[in-house]
Image (spheres, rainbow, N blue to C red):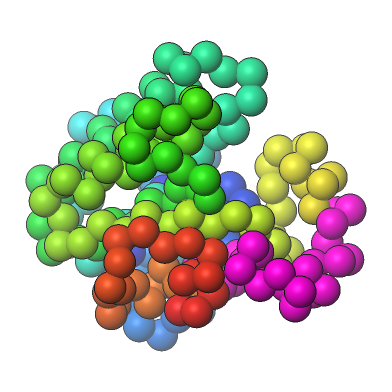
Amino acid sequence: MNVLLFGATGMVGQGVLRECLLDPHVERVLCVGRSATGGESPKLRELVVPDVGDLSAIERELTGFDACFFCLGVSSIGMTEERYTRLTYDLTLAVARTLASRNPAMTFVYVSGAGTDGTERGRSMWARVKGRTENDLRRLPFKAAYMFRPAAILPLHGVRSRTRWVQLLYAVVGPIGPAWRTLFPNTITTTEQLGRAMLRVARDGYPMPILETRDINRL
């Protein structure tokens, strides 16, 4: 399996990249982003682009992939709906449309979030935008498109968030992570489980297009 990965330097993307490189079914991984991961593997290649929303300069290199794991995302805190839409909906759909035109047999996996509003009419701005993004991704001519909606995510194996306050939060919460997973298993997953679940749906599919935390952990 050949995998495209967007957002490999973020917390989720780091975990997904690790699982891709460890998986014997993955032959090559191409990471696309504004900065390099610095990782080294015979499977790994990286393309650094100034604007992920405009892939025209590298479009020819984005053909021949079986799966795309889209792990780019930003917090909506302090943002207007217009700006959040531009960074979430517009960017994601621009990438997805480019890939769908060149990889009709591709499975596209989008990291959304628990509480996403598929009706697009709720009070929460971020949930509406995410819902619209999910809905329009599912309309594109991919082989399949899956929306992952994790709640809490516990970073493992040295994975770190680049956002300082998020990393501080995980440093505090980390010690109670195992107990949390035992007592409330449907509210928390790990970067390892998330990456493995993405690889599983890319290989084998899943009965539903939207996967909540319980589905991710089951896979």
Give the x, y percent position of residue 28: 34, 69
Q: Range of the magenta residues? A: 171-195
Image position of 67 (left or right of 18): left
How many labels were placed on the picture? Answer: 0
Q: Residue at x 10, y 57 (%)?
A: 104
Rendered location of residue 45, percent (x, y):
40, 58
Say whether residue 160 is magenta: no
Quarter containing the N terminus: bottom left
Residue 112 higher or lower than 204, as above or below = above
User: In this picture, is 174 found above or below 10?
Assistant: below
Q: Main secondary structure of the magenta part?
A: helix
Provide residue 131's location: percent of width, then percent of height. Answer: 37, 39
The structure residue drawn at horizontal position 78% and vertical position 68%, both measured from the top left corner, is: 180
Question: What residue appears at the point 41 percent right and 85 percent down from the top-left corner?
Answer: 24
- Residue 158 higher or lower than 197, as above or below: above
**In front of the other: 153 or 33:** 153
Residue shown at the point (27%, 36%) measured from the top left: 93
Q: Nearer the viewer, residue 169 or 162?
A: 169
Is residue 192 shown above or below 53?
below
> Residue 172 lies in magenta, yes or no?
yes
Q: Position of residue 20 (x, y in %)?
A: 45, 71
Q: Is residue 205 left or right of residue 172?
A: left
Is residue 119 among what the camera can see? Answer: yes
